[in-house]
Image (cartoon, rainbow, N blue to C red):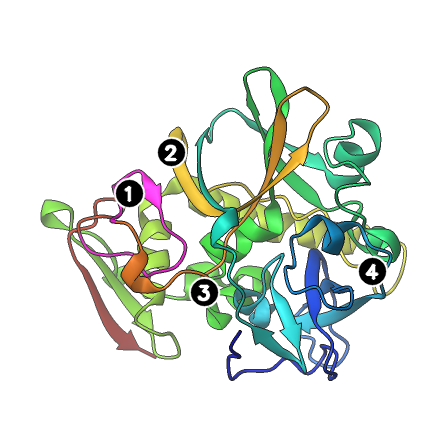
Amino acid sequence: MGQALYAIDAFPDDDLLWRIEWIGGVGYNTSVPSEPQIDVCLAQLPKGEKNPLSARARSSQVEKRTVKIGVGLLPYVWIGSVWQKRRPVITNLSTYRGRVSIDATSLRMVALGMATSRDNAIPRSSYLFGASWPNVCRTLLVAVEQDGDPYAVMVPTAEIIRFYYGLSTRLAQALFGGEYHNMFNADRSGVFKEGVVRVHLRRWLEDEDSWTLARYICSPLMQSEVSELYRNLQVYQINSPNLISRPDQALRCGFPFAGPTTIQGICLRLPGPTPDENLIAAWAKTEKPESEVEKQTPEVFCSNEEPRRGLEPLRIDLIETTSNT
């Protein structure tokens, strides 16, 4: 195991290993009102356990904490990641890596509480939330039906947001601040001759953000998902009976594409309500060396490397990035 360099102050500063169990709701930040905070639920790994997704790690009665971090840190956390002394610990989860074929047009959003308590799609014996439950029970899952199983594949919407919309600190802050459409100069950006997409970035963005913004420019579906996510957050806050509303756990956001596709990520197999197994999928960027990454095809999204020209699902031939105030 190795350690990355960055640290998150809100995480435990001790020698114990902590797994991110779930990502909760988004709420008002009293210290920095311009950056909302998101709940992150942590579970201590049992003594001697180093596999965060083992049956023992997922079902043991251990100490659990829920901390708040700024939404700008969302790109650096994912469900199943391990932390020690506030820093991420690199873990080998290659045995959990898998590819899943789904149809993004035939999915539904279900509250975690309904999927777990009513339908037993995530058995308590397989994933014990414990003290974290009040902070996650209203979070949403995208459920994909396959072969008659309505919960064949489940993806937390927080993971979809983190991976497809908030890939950087600036984009995550813009997403939850209603400023996504202002991250580029709309008058000088767009789709030009021969399918070339030009993204005229604002000065404070990185060139890598252009890949995400290019999809946003080209995809009315992604534009709709972005605006609906922010609108629902605003409606929730307006309708809150309290001056400072509780975190909104129901982050309604789907994939930025439609139709059949193949996704790749960390997949946890769980016994389901049918004889088949269910999958909880999450995406991570650090488990597999870049040299081992298989070649992407237009319908496959690989999670541990940046998109490459000519292999993106949008078939973007070129992205030009320039700066503008």
Above or below, 68 against 297 in this view is below
| SS class, disc 4 | loop
First in sequence: mark 3 or mark 4? 4
Residue 172 visible in the current orientation: yes
Which region is colored magenta? 295-309
- The kind of residue on which mark 2 rests is Thr
First in sequence: mark 2 or mark 4? 4
The residue lying furthest to the left in this view is: 194
First in sequence: mark 3 or mark 2? 2
The residue lying furthest to the top in this view is: 148
Percent position of residue 2, x then y: 51, 77
Q: Which mark, residue 313?
A: 1
Q: Nearer the viewer, mark 2 or mark 4?
A: 2
| SS class, disc 2 | strand
Residue beneath disc 2: 261
Q: Nearer the viewer, mark 4 or mark 1?
A: 1
User: Would you say the residues marked 1 and 2 are in contact, meaning their CB atoms lie under 8 Å apart?
Assistant: yes
